[in-house]
Image (cartoon, rainbow, N blue to C red):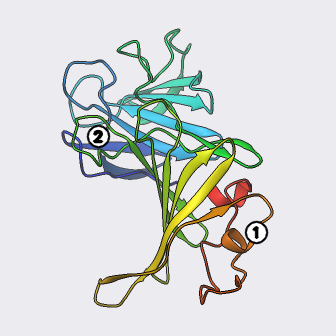
Amino acid sequence: MYVEDTGSGDGDIRIDIADSEYTAEANYDLNDDGVDETVAVLTDDGFLAYTDSDSDGEADVMRGIDERGNVVEQARYDESTGEWTSEKPDESPVGEPNGGDEGRSMVVDTPQGDREVGPPTEDTNNDGKADTAIVDTEHGQMMVTDADGDGSADQMVEISDSGEVTVAKHTGDGEWTVVEQGRVDGQGQYAAQQRSFEVNGTEDWLWNGEERDGTDRGDAAGTDPADDSFWT
């Protein structure tokens, strides 16, 4: 299980699952009291929300949320038995405690249709609202950003395990434009290698690691955002 530890919340929450203990930074204020009390855990078909409802530092309510933001399962932790007990899900969808879209899974408009990447957990522009989801990929890590707050991704930055960087921006219906490529060296220094060209469903070189004419970027991002493997 992957627990998204953003380091930007209001304290650690302990999560007990099947005799194993996980600790992560709370990254979402579910009850709108100004204090983050929930940890988001990304899954293949949505995400799990583990909430510390009594502020004792331990998650006691778990909600399973599908790709559309609907609560499909709910369980409560019994400290006396150390077990999670299923209960009827709340009627109100997780992600709309303030009547808005905060906490909902971000949508990526790919050439092959929409993809869900989970809720944003990072505030990259320091406006007090999370705008970026961190997604582990087969070849590294992807930072997916909703710059205008409409729930759809506007920018994707992938950093591969080998230090290669690809920055792409959404420029139309199912269309992305790579605005920069580069590499982070062993000293942590970034150097840009190429800028600005459009990417469409026929240019598989960008996502499949194929070499593109006129570049030396043979091992690019590695996966197509329209392919399920892009998000796994």
Left or right of residue 141: residue 37: left
Determine whether 8 is above or below 181 in the image.
above
Determine whether 75 is above or below 214 in the image.
above
Q: Position of residue 37 (x, y in %)?
A: 28, 31
Pointer 2 residue: 26
> Closer to the camera, 55 or 116?
116
> Closer to the camera, 182 or 23?
182
Camera-near label (2 vs 1) is 1
Q: Residue furthest top?
A: 91
Q: Are marks 2 and 1 in contact (CB under 8 Å)?
A: no
Q: Amino acid at mark 2?
A: Ala
Determine whether 223 is above or below 226 in the image.
below
Q: Residue at x 21, y 43 (%)?
A: 126
Can the viewer see residue 232 in this picture?
no
> Closer to the camera, 120 or 79?
120
Q: Residue at x 49, y 11 (%)?
A: 92
Can the viewer see residue 185 in this picture?
yes
Name the image quarter holding residue 79: top left
For numbered disc 1, what is the local secondary structure?
loop
